[in-house]
């Protein structure tokens, strides 16, 4: 296990070695294969998870069957923390889009560990506040941004978290199908494909299988505004 990756999770932020070791002792490691569902929207649950390796997608379904992709998360990111403060039904379905290694922490174990560690509790509250801020940004984008702008912004966000240098740009292995990328920006696949083709024709990116290479970050950033 890559401890440095785990330490990037908000729950571990600023912890000393003793507190980190005590927390890891309470966590249970598990793995998911690509396409496996960890839990469904509406399921009961009281565990928080930290991703050690791989990527997951968080999605919701409308009554008519349409799907919306809320986010894609990867190593060092945390999810499920809402159930620790409000143990109601899960608010999203979590599915592996690659091979995934997770650390899970039950509600009871977390409460035991948090006793006497107010700084760690504050980290969790800050993580929830950050999640709410991102949700507000997403709602604002759906109202005020056109589809190409939302596509550019989504790719830049994925590049920030998952990108790595390539010979001619930044490789973003997002692991998403075209349909999933469309769900992420709240648009039809045809409209998103048109935006991607336009970006490629302008020389701003190159399309690859479940990935893109961003060739002109400056113009992509400008289009995302």
Image (tube, rainbow, N blue to C red):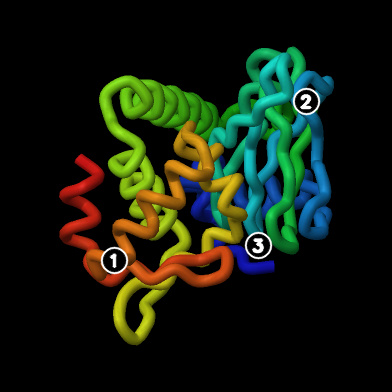
- The residue furthest bottom is 167
Whether 157 is drawn above or below 66: the answer is below
Tag 3–tag 2 contact (CB < 8 Å) = no
Left or right: where 200 falls relative to 172: left
Whether 164 is drawn above or below 74: the answer is below
Left or right: where 13 falls relative to 63: left
- Name the residue: 81% across, 55% down: 32
Tag 3–tag 1 contact (CB < 8 Å) = no
The image quarter in which residue 94 lies: top right
Q: Residues within 10 Å of mark 3 (few under 14, many from 20)?
A: many
Q: Which residue is mark 1?
A: 201
Report the front residue among 54 and 123. 54
Q: Which residue is mark 2?
A: 46
Q: Which residue is mark 3?
A: 53
Q: Nearer the viewer, mark 3 or mark 1?
A: 1
Left or right: where 224 falls relative to 94: left
Q: Nearer the viewer, mark 1 or mark 2?
A: 1
């Amino acid at each position: 296990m890559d401890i440095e990756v785990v330490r990037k999770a908000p729950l571990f932020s600023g912890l000393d070695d003793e507190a980190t070791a005590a927390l890891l002792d309470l966590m249970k490691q598990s793995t998911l294969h690509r396409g496996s569902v960890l839990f469904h929207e509406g399921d009961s649950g009281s565990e928080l998870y930290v991703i050690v390796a791989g990527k997951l997608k968080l999605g919701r379904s409308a009554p008519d069957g349409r799907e919306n992709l809320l986010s894609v998360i990867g190593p060092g990111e945390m999810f499920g923390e809402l159930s620790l403060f409000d143990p109601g039904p899960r608010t999203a379905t979590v599915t592996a889009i690659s091979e995934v290694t997770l650390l899970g922490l039950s509600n009871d174990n977390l409460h035991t560990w948090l006793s006497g560690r107010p700084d760690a509790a504050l980290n969790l509250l800050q993580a929830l506040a950050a999640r709410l801020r991102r949700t507000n940004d997403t709602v604002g984008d759906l109202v005020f941004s056109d589809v190409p702008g939302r596509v550019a912004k989504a790719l830049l966000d994925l590049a920030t978290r998952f990108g790595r240098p390539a010979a001619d740009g930044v490789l973003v292995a997002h692991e998403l199908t075209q349909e999933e990328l469309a769900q992420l920006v709240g648009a039809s696949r045809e409209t998103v494909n048109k935006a991607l083709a336009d970006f490629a024709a302008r020389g701003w990116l190159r399309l690859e299988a479940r990935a893109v290479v961003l060739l002109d970050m400056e113009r992509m950033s400008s289009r995302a505004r």
